Image: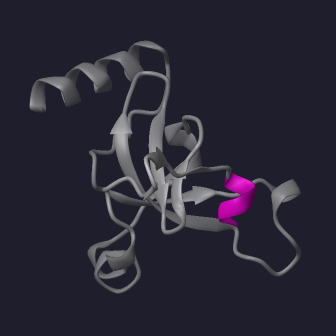
Amino acid sequence: MVANNLKVHACIAAKGGATTTFKPGDLVTLKIPPKQRLVGEALRLLVRVIKPSCQGYKLMSRHGELKGLYLASNLNPTDSSAELTLGHDISIQKPKKGEKLVLITLSKAV
């Protein structure tokens, strides 16, 4: 696992991406584009990292796994107090509806 994290970190750095890397299970906030939120809504969504890759990160919200990969530039780390209070209901286990995995878009998670 450590070797994979080092490989992902090297791949992201080689592409000129952000040097901040997140591990599976880390609680982060995802920037919500202005077009997908109403005035007065939160600017960021609390999510958990499922799987890092060279192209981005797979993320899980409390409603299900988000479709697509998200860049580290759109993610901010959270502190441990946020994980204890806000992140306890976001698991790494992928939710299923019958036999199918639940994949949602960012607009539905907001």
Q: In this view, does 32 lie to the left or right of 71?
A: right
Q: In this view, does 47 lie to the left or right of 79?
A: right
Q: Is residue 105 left or right of residue 51?
A: right
**What kind of colouring is applied to the model shown?**
one colour
- Is 100 or 3 nearer to us in this picture? 100
Relative to residue 69, is residue 35 depicted above or below? below
Image coords of residue 35 (percent x, y)? 88, 55
Q: From the image, which quarter does the N terminus lie in?
A: top left
Q: Which residue lies furthest to the front in this view?
A: 98
Seen at 36% across and 34% down, the residue is 52
Residue 96 sits in quarter = bottom left
Q: In this view, does 55 lie to the left or right of 40?
A: left
Secondary structure mostly taken by the magenta-highlighted segment of the chain: helix
Please give the count of numbered marks on the rendered protein. Answer: 0
Image coords of residue 86 (percent x, y)? 41, 81
- Is 50 or 54 nearer to us in this picture? 50
Seen at 39% across and 67% down, the residue is 78
Relative to residue 107, is residue 58 depicted above or below? above
Span highlighted in magenta in the image: 106-110
